[in-house]
């Protein structure tokens, strides 16, 4: 019963949906389930600290046959203790920790040292990848459409526009062929130079974002994930070729390999008044959802 001393090697950044790995450790959980840790996996877990892309749907093929994976969460090992999912107190990549993908199963766990196969639901993965790529594009297009609203210099995004998306974002949830990003317009954003009136002309902003997205998709453009190291805590980034230039955004998720795969990508903006602020939900939809 030794816990792994190195990160799980992950192969989903290169879009793999099948992998073979050795069981390094099986952690029995209080609810009778088990967390299976492998040396490598193609299965994308949900990141507890920033849960934008949900876990893959996947199965484990062991000496006992096929086992449904109930959940895939990130785990961290520190001082010989495994912290899973919501109990993980640090962000992935924190110094001094080992980060692993935990395959949560119910039923007879495979033996430590045995070789197992991971099979990811490729169709669901493809739908999430499309949703995630569309989400990044929409964020860049929104930043561009809001660029002239800023009243003072602000940090910029990958295209050099004031980074509204990263400065205002509250949550980002990716689903099959779609995403919902929630932005908060409040005092702190106003202090940074984005005025309360910034979203007054919702219609113009929506049109401008959708126009830019249509141009980008029509042009096509290669998308890839750059991974400086193969372990879970490696700092990966999303690289995409756009007419304005090559962009790079830190990202732990999965993506399509070319913008041309997305079909039409469109957004809607939905403002809601909350206490002391306005929250705007940007829903992004990738065309393939209407197949
Ligand atoms: Zn991302």
Image (spheres, rainbow, N blue to C red):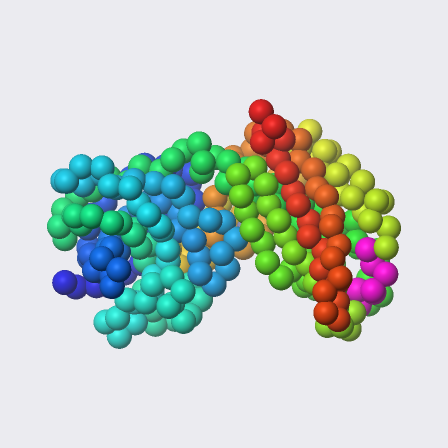
Name the spot of residue 85 as percent of width and height, x first: 38, 61
Asked if the magenta segment contains residue 145, the reply would be no
Report x, y in % for residue 56.
Answer: 40, 44
**Left or right of 97, for residue 5:** left
Q: How many numbered marks appear?
A: 0
Looking at the image, can residue 283 be seen? yes
Question: Where is residue 231 shown, x and y percent of the image?
Answer: 35, 54
Residue span colored magenta: 193-199
Q: Eyeballing the image, is 93 above or below 257?
A: below
Q: Which quadrant does the N terminus fall into?
A: bottom left
Residue drawn at (35%, 50%), measured in percent from left and top? 71
Depicted 103 relative to depicted 78: above or below: above
Whether 197 is among the magenta residues is: yes
The C terminus sits in image quarter: top right
Q: Is residue 278 left or right of residue 287?
A: right
Q: Residue at x 63, y 52 (%)?
A: 181
Taking the spot 70% from the left edge, 37% from the top edge, the residue there is: 266
The image quarter containing residue 234 is bottom left
Percent x, y of residue 270: 73, 50
Instruction: Find residue 211 and report its image quarter.
Output: top right
Q: Is residue 11 visible?
A: no
Q: Residue furthest front?
A: 31
Instruction: Determine the residue located farthest toward the top in the rendered image.
Output: 291
């Amino acid at each position: 019963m030794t816990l792994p001393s190195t990160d799980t090697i992950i192969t989903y950044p290169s879009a793999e949906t099948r992998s073979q790995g050795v069981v390094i450790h099986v952690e029995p959980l209080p609810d009778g389930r088990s967390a299976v840790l492998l040396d490598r996996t193609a299965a994308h877990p949900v990141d507890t600290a920033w849960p934008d892309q949900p876990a893959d749907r996947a199965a484990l093929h062991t000496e006992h046959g096929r086992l449904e994976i109930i959940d895939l969460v990130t785990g961290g090992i520190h001082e010989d203790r495994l912290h899973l999912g919501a109990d993980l107190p640090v962000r992935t990549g924190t110094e001094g920790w080992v980060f692993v993908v935990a395959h949560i199963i119910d039923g007879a766990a495979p033996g430590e040292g045995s070789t197992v196969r991971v099979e990811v639901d490729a169709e669901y993965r493809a739908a999430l990848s499309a949703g995630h790529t569309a989400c990044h594009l929409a964020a860049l297009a929104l930043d561009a459409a809001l660029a002239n609203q800023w009243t003072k210099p602000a940090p910029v995004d990958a295209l050099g526009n004031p980074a509204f998306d990263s400065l205002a974002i509250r949550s980002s949830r990716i689903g099959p062929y779609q995403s919902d990003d929630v932005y908060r317009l409040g005092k702190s954003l106003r202090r940074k130079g984005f005025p309360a009136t910034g979203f007054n002309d919702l219609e113009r902003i929506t049109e401008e974002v959708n126009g830019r997205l249509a141009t980008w998709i029509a042009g096509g453009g290669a998308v890839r994930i750059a991974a400086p190291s193969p372990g879970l805590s490696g700092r990966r980034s999303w690289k995409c070729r756009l007419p304005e230039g090559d962009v790079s955004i830190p990202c732990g998720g999965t993506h399509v390999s070319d913008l041309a795969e997305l079909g039409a990508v469109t957004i809607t903006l939905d403002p809601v008044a909350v206490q002391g602020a306005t929250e705007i939900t940007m829903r992004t939809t990738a065309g393939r959802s209407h197949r």
